[in-house]
Image (cartoon, rainbow, N blue to C red):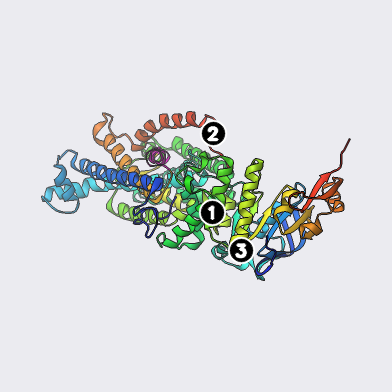
């Protein structure tokens, strides 16, 4: 896996504070995500990792602070222009009834289209490429709501790919999938990074998977930054115990050598 | 769904020359249905224009509509029949498009102008005007104003929850119930003959429409329907849920408010022509979905045509077929609508097959 950080596609938060009503979920966060890398955001339940992701793609307006993309405040960018630079796979997208895979993926072209322009060859090429990369080509005429969980997730990733953005943000893309399909999705996402140079930011639950697949790890705890950096440096036994309240040992993953969290026996 | 469904086949794809696969098949079927609905609508309009105390042959009636043919035919068709028939046509199209937009926005097959209080508002406006004793020529305007008033109430109460769907529906039902109650209060206190007139504005009727009203409301309905077509891509993106829409550059709250406004104006304009006619806005989008599948610009065109056809046919039933004299068209559509609604409810009662992912 290449580890070269680009100087573009850098997302950063400066003094970022995110709230739902009166409840502050993310407080005073300063963060810089490397461009051209895979970043995983991890942390215990309710630590604000999904909220942070929502803040980074402008689904939430900050109560204080800013989010910048290559130094420009994303809240000052036109919505479509921003959507041409970063795509999002939300945790719970709504599948419209009876919509086919191809029709779904075509919607990814929305930020590139103008009101009256017809569907272009470039639009179709982007859709074909997205279908091919996600292996959903053969499913294109199937209704999305009749697919299996793994197939459906790939269709949604294809939509985000058709959007043709340099940055791709994914909110827990592996939830509700069995192990094989989890790995399929993570392989797909990191291939996008490796083959197409995309910057990937994803919220993950599994620390071992995060360490395996990410170049950069962001650990949140109670809405604050607990640690950030390469998984090998960040993921220590002290950190896991402090953030997750799980006493553990960190051993090298026998397959990849990346850090693997092994909880201590409790009885 | 696909934003280009009305456009010619896409250029330069490797798969096939014409639109391949399921998308292409669905589109071809919809286009055939559109042609069929258009032919039926022309026939129905012709039949409605040719029927009456003075019988006119169908081709002559259609020609007379555009001012050609015998002078007597032109007079009868253009002065007496056309305003009413064409009002039914335009109002039906407007109601159907408004209903389909609302059902998509609310992600609820039971959504219709009743649910957001617009029909209650239209009756309220019209009946209030009757109560003040003002000129009856102003009634359509009052109905329009009442519908918009209901929408303003809805917006004011639902905006704080950022136009969340459940809140919109609850507030809309409350607005509808309140305005309907106000209408009933007024009617109870009216003298008998005024109450009769008022009743027309609680069920919907096309009695006494004039050319100026038709041009005004019809033109506005055409403009709003055109705007709905232009927003189709946006609506399709909004169908993916607020988060996905946001990620694609669509502000879900503002977009929903804008689309809601379009639907409200459309339903209010239709109510100005035909009163609060039930059933059309609820049933036509379902019928079209059954026939033509998930919504596309082509199926939206089919919705407009079917709505026009349905209301024109219902009004023809009222005028010339049913034995009861002076029945409001809304009574007919409601009689047909109630069983339909029951069937829908029963089908909704089944365990949901849709999933959220």
Q: Residue at x 83, y 50 (%)?
A: A250
Q: Nearer the viewer, residue B112 or A88?
A: A88
> Which badge, 1 or 3, comes first in the chain's sequence?
1
CB within 8 Å, label 2 to label 3? no
Q: Secondary structure at mark 1?
A: helix
**Chain ID, mark 3:** A
Magenta residue span? B278-293
Circle 1 residues within 10 Å: few <14, some 14–19, many ≥20: some
The residue where tag 3 is placed is A197
Circle 2 chain: B
The front one of B285 and B13 is: B13
- Crowding around mark 3 (Cα neighbors within 10 Å: few <14, some 14 to 19, many 20+) is some
The residue carrying mark 1 is: A133
Residue B190 placement (x, y as % from top left) = 42, 38
> Observer-nearest residue: A192 or B71?
A192
Q: Are marks 1 and 2 in contact (CB under 8 Å)?
A: no
Circle 2 crowding by C-alpha within 10 Å: few under 14, some 14–19, many from 20:
few
- Mark nearer the viewer, 1 or 2: 1
Q: Give the labeled residue for mark 2.
A: B352
Q: CA distance from mark 1 to mark 2?
A: 32 Å
The outermost residue toward the right is A267
Chain under disc 1: A
Element under disc 2: loop
Say if residue B84 shows up in the picture: no
Q: Is residue B133 left or right of residue B70?
A: right
Q: On the rendered structure, is A149 left or right of B272?
A: right
- In magenta segment, residue B288: yes
**Residue A171 belongs to magenta span:** no
């Amino acid at each position: 896996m290449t580890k070269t950080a680009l100087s573009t596609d850098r997302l950063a938060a400066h003094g970022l504070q995110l709230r739902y009503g009166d409840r502050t979920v993310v407080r005073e966060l300063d963060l810089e995500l490397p461009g051209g890398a895979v970043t995983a955001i991890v942390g215990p339940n309710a630590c604000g990792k999904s909220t942070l992701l929502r803040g980074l793609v402008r689904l939430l307006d900050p109560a204080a602070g800013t989010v910048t993309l290559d130094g420009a405040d994303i809240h000052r960018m036109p919505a479509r222009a921003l959507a041409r630079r970063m795509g999002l796979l939300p945790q719970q997208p709504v599948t419209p009834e009876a919509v086919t895979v191809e029709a779904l993926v075509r919607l990814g072209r929305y930020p590139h289209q103008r009101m009256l322009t017809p569907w272009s060859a470039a639009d179709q090429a982007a859709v074909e490429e997205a279908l091919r990369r996600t292996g959903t080509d053969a499913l294109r005429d199937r209704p999305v709501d009749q697919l299996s969980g793994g197939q459906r997730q790939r269709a949604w990733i294809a939509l985000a790919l058709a959007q043709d953005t340099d940055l791709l943000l994914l909110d827990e893309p592996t939830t509700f999938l069995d192990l094989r399909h989890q790995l399929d999705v993570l392989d797909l996402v990191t291939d996008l990074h490796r083959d197409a140079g995309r910057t990937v930011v994803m919220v993950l639950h599994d620390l071992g998977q995060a360490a395996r697949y990410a170049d950069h790890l962001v650990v949140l705890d109670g809405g604050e930054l607990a640690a950030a950096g390469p998984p090998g440096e960040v993921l220590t036994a002290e950190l896991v115990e402090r953030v997750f309240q799980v006493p553990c040992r960190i051993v090298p993953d026998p397959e990849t050598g990346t850090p693997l969290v092994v909880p201590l026996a409790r009885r | 769904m696909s934003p280009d469904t009305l456009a010619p086949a896409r250029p330069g794809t490797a798969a096939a020359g014409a639109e391949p696969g399921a998308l292409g098949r669905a589109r071809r079927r919809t286009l055939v249905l559109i042609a069929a609905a258009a032919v039926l609508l022309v026939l129905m309009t012709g039949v409605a224009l040719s029927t009456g105390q003075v019988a006119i042959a169908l081709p002559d009636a259609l020609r007379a509509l555009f001012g050609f043919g015998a002078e007597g035919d032109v007079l009868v068709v253009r002065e007496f029949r056309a305003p009413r028939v064409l009002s039914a046509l335009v109002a039906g199209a407007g109601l159907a498009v408004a209903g389909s937009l609302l059902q998509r926005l609310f992600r609820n097959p039971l959504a219709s102008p009743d649910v957001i209080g617009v029909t209650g508002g239209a009756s309220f406006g019209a009946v209030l005007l009757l109560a003040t004793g003002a000129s009856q020529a102003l009634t359509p305007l009052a109905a329009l104003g009442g519908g918009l008033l209901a929408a303003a109430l809805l917006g004011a109460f639902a905006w704080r929850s950022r136009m969340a769907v459940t809140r919109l529906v609850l507030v809309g039902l409350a607005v509808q119930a309140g305005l309907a109650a106000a209408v009933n209060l007024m009617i109870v206190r009216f003298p008998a003959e005024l109450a009769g007139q008022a009743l027309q504005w609680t069920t919907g009727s096309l009695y006494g429409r004039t050319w100026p009203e038709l041009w005004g409301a019809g033109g506005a309905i055409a403009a709003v329907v055109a705007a709905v077509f232009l927003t189709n891509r946006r609506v399709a993106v909004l169908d993916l849920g607020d988060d996905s829409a946001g990620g694609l550059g669509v502000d879900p709250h503002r977009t929903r408010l804008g689309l809601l406004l379009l639907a409200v104006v459309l339903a209010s304009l239709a109510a100005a022509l035909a009163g609060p006619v039930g059933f059309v806005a609820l049933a036509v989008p379902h019928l079209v979905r059954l026939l033509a599948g998930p919504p596309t610009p082509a199926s939206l065109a089919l919705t407009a045509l079917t709505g026009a056809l349905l209301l024109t046919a219902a009004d023809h039933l009222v005028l010339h077929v049913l034995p009861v004299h002076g029945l409001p068209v809304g009574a007919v559509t409601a009689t047909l609508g109630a069983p339909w609604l029951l069937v829908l409810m029963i089908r909704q009662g089944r365990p949901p097959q849709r999933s959220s992912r």
